[in-house]
Image (cartoon, helix red, strand yellow):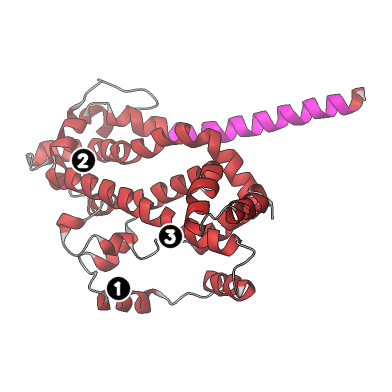
Amino acid sequence: MVNIYKKDKIFDWVVIIIMGVFSVVLLLPLLHVLASSFSSPEAVNLGKVGLFPVNFSLVSYQKVFANKLIMRGYLNTIIYTVIGTIIQLILQFTAAYALSRKDLKYKRFWNVFFVIPMFIGGGMIPTYLVVKSLGMINTIWAMIIPGCVSLFNIIIIRTYMTSMIPYELQEAAMIDGASNFRIFIQIVVPLSKPIIAVMTLYAIVGYWNAYFNSLLYLTDDSLFPLQRVLQTMLIANDSGQIGGGVGNVESELLAETLKYATIIVSTAPILLLYPFFQRFFEKGLMVGGLKG
């Protein structure tokens, strides 16, 4: 018994050390980016910034928030994320609820029907042609509708519903005269909070980081999401555009600092969301992914 206890303690310490090293490896680049964004342009360009700001300055954030293109991209991303998340949750949870019902007609067929597209996709060109034929090119819907449903997420949600929500509750409600819609709203949804939190976080992160659809479907820069704006600036190194039209010398000094500030501005909202979803995230992910 003592030997088993010692082995468990050794195992715990090994895990703690490995995860500690892994966390440090992940945190160091983030701390460097954060420190650089709050440092003076001269210190950044001379390579003096490590993990702490050098010659503390907010000039890069002032330029970022004064840039109309970045702020418009920020607003577009918020719109795409909010609308897309709502649509995605509604579609995925209603589909998963239908698949979880034991009285669903041709249930085996529908399960196979939903699984096949997970392995066989239409491809980029057919998808583009469909989006174009629907008139969604250069509209906000081109960033929201394509990919708004994840079949893998539907399977996870269905597994959660069949594993964690007793079907007897639904049968009892049906005996009392409740409709499927009422059962879904008043019984299934309240008991699905953990998996709702997981899928909400997945949807928010997916829409917030999305930029590939904008490469395919958007040519109007007024509709560009923040990640597309950031990607364009980082690749083109167009510091004059980032800085809002500052002089050449100042633009060269501000270029790197502005990149760091833009990265922080674009990732901060997502990083701040995780603590609020953490207590639901672990339970929902483990149960939805492992049971059933």
Q: Is residue 16 magenta?
A: yes
In the rendered image, residue 126, in percent from the top left (x then y), is placed at 36, 79
Q: Residue at x 18, y 43 (%)?
A: 71
The mark nearer the N terminus, 1 or 3, is 3
Q: Is residue 220 visible?
A: yes
Residue 244: numbered disc: none
The mark nearer the N terminus, 1 or 2, is 1
Residue hosting label 3: 91
Q: Which residues are magenta?
A: 4-29
Q: Residue at x 58, y 57 (%)?
A: 158
Residue hosting label 2: 255
Dots 1 and 3: beta carbons under 8 Å? no
Dots 1 and 2: beta carbons under 8 Å? no
Instruction: Kindly indicate the quadrant of the structure image that contains residue 271.
Output: top left
Question: Alpha carbon of mark 1 to alpha carbon of mark 3: how far?
Answer: 19 Å
Which residue ends up furthest to the right in the rendered image?
1
Q: Is residue 139 left or right of residue 19?
A: left
In the rendered image, residue 286, in percent from the top left (x then y), is placed at 63, 45
The amino acid sitting under disc 1 is: Val
The amino acid sitting under disc 3 is: Leu
Dominant secondary-structure state across the stretch colored magenta = helix
Q: Is residue 174 left or right of residue 263?
A: right
Question: Alpha carbon of mark 1 to alpha carbon of mark 2: how far?
Answer: 36 Å
The amino acid sitting under disc 2 is: Ala
Q: Residues within 10 Å of mark 2 (few under 14, many from 20)?
A: many
At mark 2, the secondary structure is helix
Q: Is residue 13 magenta?
A: yes
Residue hosting label 1: 131
- Quarter holding the C terminus is bottom right
Q: Name the residue nearer the viewer: 47 or 222.
A: 222
